[in-house]
Amino acid sequence: MSMDPRFSTARRARRAAVALALAALALTAVTAAFARTTAATAPSGTITFDGVWTGQEAQHFQAVINAFHKQYPHVNVQYKPVGDNLPTVLATAVAGGRPPDMADIAQPGLVKQFARKRVLKPITYARPALAANFTPSWLRLGTVDGKLYGFVFKASNKSTVWYSVPAFRNAGVKPPTTWAQLLAAGKRIRLSGVPPYSIGGADGWTLTDLFENIYLRQAGATKYELLSEHKLKWTDPSVARALETMREIVGNAANMVGGTSGALQTDFPTSVNNVFQTPPKGAVVFEGDFVPGVATVKARAGVDYNEFAFPSIDRSKPMVEIGGDTIVAFHDTPAIRAFVKFLATPRAAAAWARFGGFATGNRKMSPSVYPNATTRKTAAAIAHAKAVEFDMSDEQPSAFGATVGQGEWGLFQSFLRAPSNVRGIQRQLEAAASAAYKNGT
């Protein structure tokens, strides 16, 4: 007797249901096992992180930490905003044998010092992620004696030039792309009745930045690095040539707002206001992408002021001098490794970049993240420059490169007073550099 087809169909359905239930149970078991394995191997723990970023910058870095936490919920990053005293705080902590797990350091010279004392841990495990997102120039900035110890997470473009839009328009000049064009524009602006250059000579570091941008383009990256490390003497002909070029700007008192004496008494914020105010007192100020943030006069981007890249000299390719904060690690754990590699990603950069006041060499982060056209322009120059170098004075002992009234800062003020004394200033720079490197301060 043949079976009713309906019973056969029902039996097959029951068998299929049982099979599906068994498969579901098996999948649940596998999923649970995978979850247990992942939980056991996923990074966990606490990371202590001391940083230079305070106030709003600390809040913006917290946004980066929050993005990391979404990916690694079992890692707790404890950020401590230390500010400009960070080098002293870190030195004390290192001497006491209790440094934080990680830090961001604005002085590349200090990174080298810690690396050579073997208190930093190499981050060679992050090289693949960094190489995928940054050019070799950026990786070199965190390399000490051939080993990778850090990378620049947050940078500032110090190869920007800011100008008064009305002053340029009234003189009938356009933003120059070469040094010769800059000098020609300066002459036309002066004839229009406005001193072309606003020089903040009361702050010696503005003068060193001008020299460094000239030297990088004239002498090239190799000599720039040698001079930064005092492996090339300040009496070298390449230094004389750069000083002679700088003299084309500061050697004529009529070129500067207030003349030579006025330039020596003008601090950095005032030098910016001279260009940004209406009507302008000067047409051009040489400084980094942070210039608009220090202006205390009301000025509109693209209307009252604008920006162009530091001009090419002798057909030099695009080069950028930067200030930057280098991520380093004093310990090595899976949690630290995860955070370091995360910070190398476009996602980490974007978490801060959307707020502004941030630039990155991470070429994989979309420029559309930046909040305005000016930031997109200055930041793009950083990401795509053929050569990227740290601010030279930041790489040197502070007694020579970063002390008010002495070393580079004081001697470049002397050069501003007497720009014809090129050889004399060279000898004084070399004597000061030799003394600072000998003492290691």
Image (cartoon, rainbow, N blue to C red):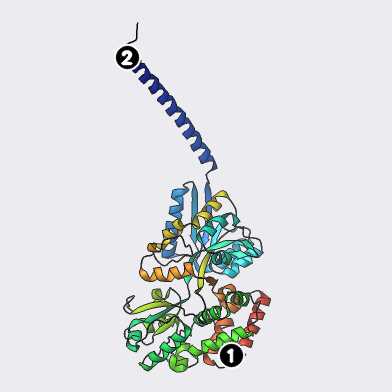
Q: Is residue 184 left or right of residue 326?
A: left
Q: Is residue 5 above or below residue 328?
A: above
Return the x and y of residue 41 as percentages of the image width and height.
54, 42
Task: Report x, y in % for residue 427.
Answer: 64, 87
Q: Are marks 2 and 1 in contact (CB under 8 Å)?
A: no
What type is the residue that disc 2 sits on? Pro
Residue sitting farthest toward the right = 438
Q: Residues within 10 Å of mark 1 (few under 14, many from 20)?
A: some
- Mark 2 = which residue? 5
Position above or below: 354 against 291: above
- What distance separates the C-alpha of mark 2 from that of mark 1? 107 Å
User: Residue 367 appears in which quarter of the rendering?
Assistant: bottom left
Q: Amino acid at mark 1?
A: Val
Q: Residue at x 45, y 50 (%)?
A: 69
> Residue 84 versus residue 121: which sits nearer the camera?
121
Q: Earlier in the sequence, mark 2 or mark 1?
A: 2
The x and y percentages for residue 222 are 61, 74
Question: Is residue 295 among the parts visible in the rendering?
Answer: no
Residue 430 picture location, percent across and down: 64, 83
Residue 5 appears left or right of 108 = left
Q: Is residue 63 visible from the viewing direction of this image? A: yes
The residue positioned 48% from the left and 48% from the top of the image is 72
The residue pinned by badge 1 equals 422
Foreground of the two, 179 or 214: 179
